[in-house]
Amino acid sequence: MNNKKGIKNWNGLILIFLVGMLGMTSCKSTTAVQTDGSVQTKPARFLLKKMETNALDFEWFNGKAKIKYVDMTQNRSIKASIRIQKGKQIWMSFSLFGFEGARVKITPDSVFVINRINKEYTAKSLSYLEQQFKLPASYPLVEALLVGNPATIKGSEYTVAIKNNQYLLNTKTPADATYILNGLTYQLARLIIKDEQQQKVDIEFKEYEATEDGRQFSYLRDIIISSPKRGNASTSINYTKVQFDVEKQMNFKIPNGYKVVD
């Protein structure tokens, strides 16, 4: 791996994980704007309540995943271990060719990245994501993305459409967001967010299956970010193992001699 590109490789992947998650509460109003006759029209409040019911409740989350990351300059396949202590911290380890290349810790206000390839580390506030992508970011919604829970925008008004046996919930403020739900199960199938800079985050939630304790979990996520300034990047996250409510250690120590990078 080129040392000059190493930190960008890992940080680009991490940012793909984090962007696209916005504030989480109920909507103000509902308008049905389109149907195709295949499923019955439902108000936004009903659909949001169904998404809330389908959301996974947990205190601890442990997952292992295979990740493929592609952007304008690289095509990487890596493995990841992801651990979450709900509301407190997220720990992630990324491995390439059997060796740990990066370790990440996310708290309610900060993001820390250890780059073992270049012997560097970086520390950013969550507001960095807002500066980079012009979207409000919050820790609970990073959790939501990693476990596959829906995230709706605080205080927004929604319209409802039906297309191809799916419900489309759309809001325009503070960002243009569309939540696409399965017409039968109401599970989140896709989330599309656009900002005023014409950047777009498109997340597909696929392969819902029951975990060992019977929870419905999306084992495959496809994430695409497109930007007029930064180009396109995509990540495929294929979970191979998932475990809930088993406490795990989250060791995170910056080695002596590692250089701070912006």
Image: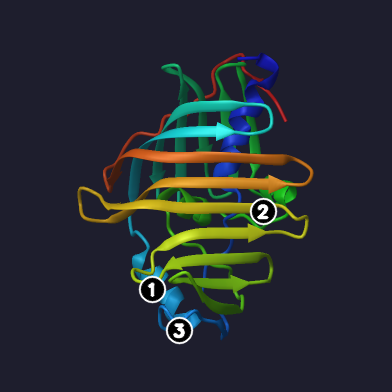
Of marks 1 and 3, the one in the foreground: 3
Of marks 2 and 1, the one in the foreground: 2
Dot 1 surroundings within 10 Å: few (below 14), some, or many (20 or more)? some
What is the CA distance from the residue labelled 3 to the residue labelled 2?
Answer: 27 Å
Q: Which three-letter amino acid code belongs to the residue tagged 1?
A: Lys
Displayed quadrant of residue 165: bottom left
What is the CA distance from the residue labelled 1 to the residue labelled 3?
Answer: 14 Å
Depicted 177 relative to depicted 31: above or below: above
Kindly indicate whether the residue at mark 1 contacts the one at mark 2 (C-beta within 8 angstroms). no
Report whether 20 appears left or right of 230.
Answer: left
Of marks 3 and 2, the one in the foreground: 3
Residue 98 at x, y percent in the picture: 41, 17
Which numbered disc flags the more N-terminal residue, 3 or 2? Answer: 3
Q: Which three-letter amino acid code belongs to the residue tagged 2?
A: Lys
Pick the front one: 8 or 89: 8
Which mark, by number, is residue 200?
Answer: 2
Say which residue appears at 33% left-offset and 55% top-offset: 58
User: Where does label 1 land, which residue?
Assistant: 50
Displayed quadrant of residue 121: top right
Secondary-structure class at tag 3: loop
Dot 3 surroundings within 10 Å: few (below 14), some, or many (20 or more)? some
Say which residue appears at 57% left-offset and 64% top-offset: 23
Which mark, by number, is residue 41?
Answer: 3
Pick the front one: 198 or 261: 198
Depicted 162 relative to depicted 257: above or below: below
Task: Say whether residue 139 is visible.
Answer: no
Secondary-structure class at tag 1: helix
Residue 259 at x, y percent in the picture: 67, 19
Kindly indicate whether the residue at mark 3 contacts the one at mark 1 (C-beta within 8 angstroms). no
Displayed quadrant of residue 5: top right
Residue 115 at x, y percent in the picture: 58, 23
